Image (cartoon, grey):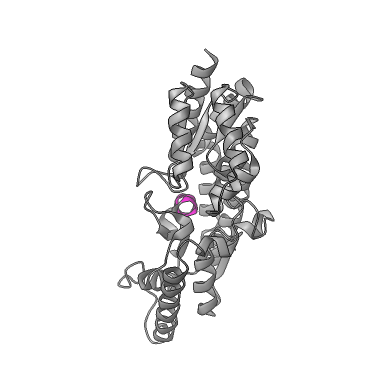
Amino acid sequence: MTPSQQSLLGRAPGTAVAAVAVAVVALTMILAGCAMTPPAGGQGSTTFSPRVVRVVAAENVWGSIATQLGGAHAHVVSIITNPATDPHAFEPTAADARELADAQVAVQNGAGYDPWMTRLLAADGGARTVLDVGDLVGVAPGGNPHFWYSPTYVDKFIVAMTADLIRADPTDRTYFVDRRVHFEQVDLADYRDTIARIRARFAGTSVGASESVVVYLCQALGLHLITPPAFLRAVSEGTDVSAADKATIDAQIGDHAIAVYLENTQNLTPDIQTQVAAARAARIPVVSVSETLEPVGSTFQGWQTAQLHSLESALESSHA
């Protein structure tokens, strides 16, 4: 996806701006009160030890990783957690502002994906650490912001998140480093092995997709994503798709030019629903992906690996 901040808010401009304004006001009031009250946890009622780092992540994709890296020495709250939520049209609440007011480390996806988080942070004025993943990986607003589908970018986030935890709680440096090593070598083992296996077996296979959420994933797997880039971008940004691009995709499905169709279940437009139906009618496997952990309660690696296994099975069936 290559959204701009305008396109992210453009789906519901009035309500989104109003919601952000309410949250910003609430955050300002909360910060004023923080000078007179002890640091509080997720519900504003728990006082944390100095050796428990308070982290707020805009999306649970990053929150899941932060939770596993932080272990017993971090309290992590993710703002977007519902798989039914369209992250592009998300509107923060006063409760979200309250969570952010107590954070020592804030994580936002960046690159224009969560501009509401930028507004909340701007109202803060505090000294907390902000880990902006877009800045970390060098992708500016307007670039593809779905960084969690890039194994390389995930690795960069793991290193940066660990460093931020250590900065907030240097006493537990060894603990955080050990957590990082375990996460990288043990918890992500199946995720990484599956990526390597798919790439070794199916690199060069042509696939189609509903939007650019899977671009980084296809690159990592060596898959050839042949859906017109302009179509992927338009669906991601919620703008009109061209008749020519739709005709191209119809032909790709009808001619069995793609082995698998990847469908973002959190952004199903009428055009996408038509393509999914056509792919199924043509007996082309359809693999679901999402932008938020699914099901609720999943870990990052559990969610990603389950999607990868589904894709691997679909590729196997298409090559049978």
Looking at this view, is 197 or 21 the one in front?
A: 21
Residue placed furthest toward the top: 320
Q: How many marks?
A: 0
Looking at this view, is 88 or 294 the one in front?
A: 88
Most prominent secondary structure in the magenta stretch? helix
Looking at this view, is 88 or 171 the one in front?
A: 88
Residue placed furthest toward the right: 138
- The x and y percentages for residue 173 are 55, 57
Q: Please tell me whether residue 298 is drawn above or below residue 143 in the rendered image.
A: above
Residue 123 magenta-drawn?
no
Looking at this view, is 216 or 13 the one in front?
A: 13
- Left or right: 241 as drawn, with respect to 57: right
Q: Where are the magenta residues, as a range?
A: 61-69
Identify the residue shown where x is 36% and y is 42%: 295
Q: Quadrant of residue 23?
A: bottom left
Identify the residue shown where x is 65% and y is 57%: 142
- The x and y percentages for residue 105 are 51, 66
Q: Please tell me whether residue 139 is drawn above or below residue 123 in the rendered image.
A: above
Task: Report whether residue 192 is seen.
Answer: no
Task: Report whether residue 55 is seen.
Answer: yes
Identify the residue shown where x is 58% and y is 49%: 234
Identify the residue shown where x is 55% and y is 44%: 213
Q: Quadrant of residue 152?
A: top right
- The x and y percentages for residue 135 are 65, 60
- Left or right: 97 as drawn, with respect to 243: left
- The x and y percentages for residue 159 are 61, 52
- Left or right: 275 as drawn, with respect to 85: right
Residue placed furthest toward the left: 45
Residue 63 magenta-drawn?
yes
Q: Please tell me whether residue 78 is drawn above or below residue 245 in the rendered image.
A: below
